Image (spheres, rainbow, N blue to C red):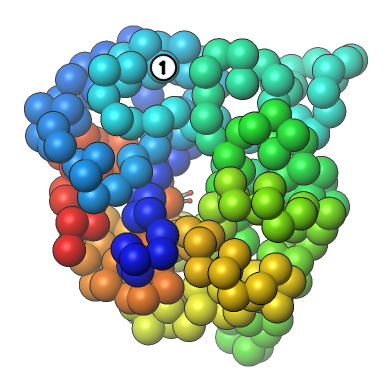
Amino acid sequence: MNRKYRHTVIAGNWKMNLLASDVKAYATELRSLIPDFHKWCDAIACVPFTSLPAAIRAFRTTRVMIGAQNMNQHKSGAYTGEVSGAQLKDLGVRYVIIGHSERRELFGETDDIVNKKVLAAIQQQLRPIICVGESLGQRETGVTNDLVAMQVKSALNGVDALKLRSAIIAYEPIWAIGSGLTATPQDAQDVCCEIRAVIRSLYGARTARAIPVLYGGSMNEKNAHDLLAQPDIDGGLIGGASLKPELFAAIIKAANQ
Ligand code: 13P
């Protein structure tokens, strides 16, 4: 983390877990565990679409901001089952995860679609949390940095420097997601540093310094401290460990270093 230039961001990705009726108890417990964390980090809960209204209500009196996990790239129209950025914005959603590897792998999201979603999110003044990361095979063949650089460039195609200031990049090695395997702090730092170098080459040093780059992939209350101690890791995107308020709170506390 480098607090001089950037906010620390701890974001939970609940994926397809928990019910709308679970949200109130979660929010109450989180608030009781860490009443004053907003002094050291921005906390975000990216909840399922069905829980968004409940989350916006339940977290209203806390500093936890609410994000969605996906959106459609179109403004409106005949896209059965999809949700637009305007509809998220209308609910009071502030953030949206774009291009998570589960969406790329299971739902056919290409780099081009990810780029269109990033542009659509920014147009709605939603802050995109843009996910990039390599598979195990790609890591083993040594293409991680090139691949991640390409994903970042593609996702940001057509995004101007001023608008980019609202974006967050999350480096999530696919092999570390939900597997219990975590990238070593140094490996995660190396890729996050490369991501910042790509942003620097596209937008200049000042913008690159300002963009939070998160790590995601089996981050938990035990490894968070060491990961967050790296200079280019500005926070975490947390799946499994964000589902329990006590674990999420412990990670938020680890960001207070
Ligand atoms: P886990 O923390 O469960 O590995 O999930 C990471 C992730 O995919 C967050 O978006």
Residue 17: x %, y % from top left? 42, 29
Quadrant including the N terminus: bottom left
Residue 252: x %, y % from top left? 23, 48
Taking the view exactly as shown, the residue that stands out farthest to the bottom is 142
Could one spot residue 86 in this view of the protein? yes
Taking the view exactly as shown, the residue that stands out farthest to the right is 78
Could one spot residue 191 in this view of the protein? no
In the depicted view, which residue is nearer to us: 51 or 170? 170
Residue located 77% across and 43% down the image: 119
Taking the view exactly as shown, the residue that stands out farthest to the left is 32
Instruction: Determine which quarter of the picture holds residue 202.
Output: bottom right
Q: Which residue is the site of mark 1?
A: 56
Q: Secondary structure at mark 1?
A: helix
Residue located 74% across and 34% down the image: 123
* Residue type, label 1: Ile
Q: Is residue 45 above or below residue 171?
A: above
In the depicted view, which residue is nearer to us: 93 or 105? 93
Quadrant including the C terminus: bottom left
Q: Is residue 164 above or below residue 74?
A: below
Numbered-mark total: 1
Indicate left or right for 73 with 147 as reference: right
Residue 230: x %, y % from top left? 33, 76
Indicate left or right for 248 with 216 as reference: left
